[in-house]
Image (spheres, grey):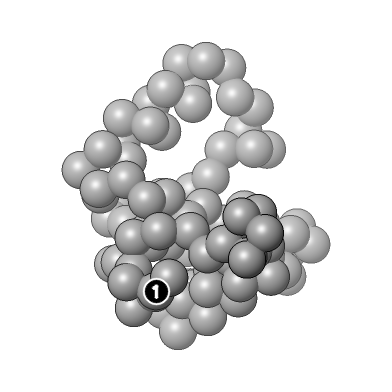
Amino acid sequence: MPDERKGERLAVLPTLDDIRLPNVLEKFTANGLPNLFMPRRDHFVRVGMLPMLGSGKLNLREVQRIAMDTLMAMNLNPSSDTSSFPPATPHDNAS
């Protein structure tokens, strides 16, 4: 994702329930993931399933579009921080 300050920022599209995400972040830290690669809580966009191509590969363009559309719709500033995760996207039931 584009970021005005850093050039790029991470966006994460988990399929896990929101209740499990804090534990995932704790494991990232416990396993020594560098801060540069640590996703912020407000950059998670929960989806029901990841978009796939007909070949069975991950549709990276659609992943990027979902992340950008959702985060832009939420009007997130790259320097902001929230204590909760963004709501599930309307793409949760997409195939």
Q: Residue furthest left?
A: 19
Please tell me how crowded label 1 is: few (under 14), some (14-19), or many (20+) other residues with Cα within 10 Å: few
Q: Is residue 4 left or right of residue 40?
A: right
In the rendered structure, which amino acid carries the disc numbered 1?
Ala
Question: Residue 7: x, y in percent?
Answer: 79, 62
The residue at the point 32 percent across, 71 percent down is 93
Q: Relative to 38, is 75 on the left or the right?
A: left
Q: In this view, which residue lies farthest toward the top?
A: 31
Question: As drawn, which residue projects farthest toward the bottom?
Answer: 73
Pick whichever, 5 or 16, lies toward us: 16
Q: Tell me if residue 75 can be seen.
A: no
Q: Where's residue 31, x and y in %? A: 52, 15
Q: For mark 1, what is the residue?
A: 94
| Residue 73 quadrant | bottom left
Q: Position of residue 94 (x, y in %)?
A: 39, 74
* Foreground pick, 86 / 88: 88
Is 77 or 74 nearer to us in this picture?
Answer: 74
Asked if 41 appears above or below 94 in the picture, the reply is above
Where residue 68 appears, as percent x and y from the top left, is 58, 74
Quadrant of the frame with the N terminus: bottom right
Task: Tell me if residue 12 comes above or below residue 3 in the rendering.
Answer: above
> Residue lying furthest front in this view?
55
92 horizontally vs 10: left or right: left
Q: Is residue 18 left or right of residue 26?
A: left
- Image point (65%, 54%), residue name: 57
The image quarter in which residue 27 lies: top left
Point out the image quarter for the C terminus.
Answer: bottom left
Q: Secondary structure at mark 1?
A: loop
The residue lying toward the viewer, choosing from 23 and 91, is 91
Q: Which residue sits at x=34%, y=78%? A: 90
Instruction: Decide if residue 85 is in sight here.
Output: yes
